[in-house]
Image (tube, helix red, strand yellow):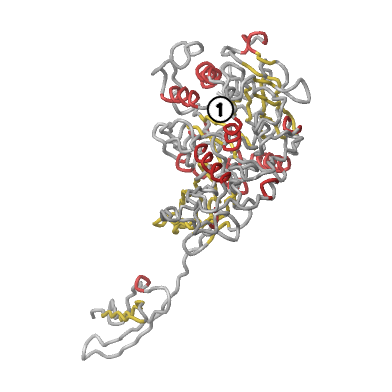
Amino acid sequence: MRPRERVQRRSGRAAFVAALALFASASTAGAEAIGEFLVSGASVLAAEVHQSGAASSGISFDASLPVVAAPSVALARAPYLQRVTPNAGVVRWRTTVSTSTRVRWGLAADSLWMTVDVPGSRTEHEVALTGLPAETKIFYSVGSATQTLAGGDADHSFHTPPVAGARRPTRIWVIGDSGMCAASSQGCTDAAAVRSGYFAFAAGQPANLWLLLGDNAYSSGTDAQFTAGLFDVYPTVTRSTPMWLVPGNHEFGTGGSDSPTQSGPYYDSFTLPTAGEAGGVPSGTEAYYSFDWGNVHVLALDSHDTSRSAPANPTTNVCPPGQGGAMYQWACADLAATSADFVIAIWHHPPYSKGSHDSDAESQLTQMRERFLPVMEAYGVDLVLTGHSHSYERSVLLDGHYGLSATYSPALHAVDAGDGDPGGDGAYEKALLGPDPHSGEVSAVVGSSSQISGGALDHPVMEKSLDVLGSMVIDVVGRQLDARFIGVSGNVLDHFRIVKGPVLPVCSNGMDDDGDGRVDLADSGCSSASGDSEVPAIPECRNGIDDDGDGAIDVGGPNPDPGCNLAQMQKEAPQCSDLTDNDGDGATDHPADATCLGAWDDDEATNPPPSSCGLVGIEPLAIGAWMLLRRRRSRPVDTIGAQRHVRLGQSRSRRR
């Protein structure tokens, strides 16, 4: 008999009433899935039963409606942060079943007021966040349109970086060859110990960003090994610390990753800049790239699966136009373009090592030393970080040593043969703040973050060689970089410091010399970050400058603002009728808006009517400050230091 089907509409929603008479024979009922006819809410199911013919005898009806629950959704990979910049970032995660995609974010864990949805259904979730405020803590959650899987708490948050060039205290965590948990239980034990050592050292000051030096998934770079060796080991780090990484040799095993085509598990798992989205010169590939974080520029290379070709005689013929492979030419262009205070280069194969790998004997190591290290030194790179050898090795301050280990001469190649430890021989010093060609670089092998493998550990350029588990923590504060190798107990096993630029004896220079975000004004503490006690106050706060560095411009009103004397109070009242974007959210403040103090709940109209010029009642000093501020904003430099320099008529000739 032909099934009959009716549709009944109730309260504007469709309820499907399916009348099905399906018989495979006179005595056996057929079956039909009707789930596709049902909708969320109340549905009515009706069935009609008929004899197959007028002469048929006997009729029975035995039906059931089994309910199959929707598959449960869980995280296969916890949230992780990619390509975070001052105003944007990418949040990724993986689910066990296909779902819709949603990220909610805001400036408080209990107020995630922005929602970003990605159409469609998937297990691999990738959401780009835009319009983020710089130097701000962002809270977020991930899940689907109907379910939150993680976040909405203090643990799921991250800080956006300052604009490129701004001097702010920055902490970097560095690990290498960390993926052994995918290959052995001992690897899991060792990786966990290194992670615990970092947590113990960092305590309440976690890193702002995280560098991974390759071999992040042993031993073949499969998708499952990335999950087991990276994402399952560090979920509490990935959710709050932006991750930047390079591939090692183990990423390119049977897992199928391929740099020329940017395909396979490595490239599927990560979102890295290709078009200069995070600063630097666009590379056009995720295999190698660069980014800026405040006054630090990081250059990342693929030393295994991308061509390492270079010009003839690369140790002396450095960066001739149009010569060398694509990665070589890009590295030349990128380093030539940066003016960052500190430049760090990362790749996998070390130029110097006598650990589990020998830089005198292996082609990748030799080629990176002979072909790429001259480029780094010609453009003033300060620190080269690599892995591959499962140990910790750290050089003195070097320049010009591109040959075999036996050819090293301290007299020829050591810019400073001391230990670089402020508690020992003293810090390594460079005369210029910014890229300083051939002023020396420190080369460090940080390859013992999930295993140690011994070796001779006797390379002559090395100041320190240790066959111990650990990771590195780098702190950049103003003109000073401190790097520490941290053991599994949180103890410091090596410490070196690089100080750049002359120390200014007079602190009332209007600059943030120690990089703590506050302008130095006649303060004896401004020569030392550790003993810093600047009070960057100007008695008259209506000066058009963000004196305490919290992003709000002091422009007064009838009464001076007491908040501009103390950074921790952050109570500036930037008069909102001045036609400037005081809270830096891209919307012009005008008289109709009373909320311009907070970018997070700001409703400024960006196009006020001409009659609302907003200048009525503002004192002449504030108007002059506003005009000066408008001129200053056209200069893409450190907002505090540069503003003060313009105001005081000083130059920055030593910043190159």
Give the side of residue 207 with respect to residue 19, left or right: right
Q: Give the residue displayed 72% in from the left and 35% down from the top.
A: 487
Give the side of residue 532 with respect to residue 176, left or right: right
Q: Position of residue 390 (x, y in %)?
A: 63, 29
Give the side of residue 642 with respect to residue 483, left or right: left
Q: Is residue 457 above or below residue 593?
A: above
Q: Give the residue displayed 65% in from the left and 37% down from the top.
A: 169
Q: Is residue 541 above or below residue 394?
A: below
Residue 496, visible in the rendered structure: yes
Q: Secondary structure at mark 1?
A: strand
Q: Position of residue 222 (x, y in %)?
A: 49, 41
Task: Tell me the residue that label 1 is attached to.
Answer: 345
Q: Residues within 10 Å of mark 1 (few under 14, many from 20)?
A: many
Q: Position of residue 458 (x, y in %)?
A: 69, 18
Q: Position of residue 395 (x, y in %)?
A: 66, 21
Q: Nearer the viewer, residue 28 or 107?
A: 107
Q: Quadrant of residue 348?
A: top right
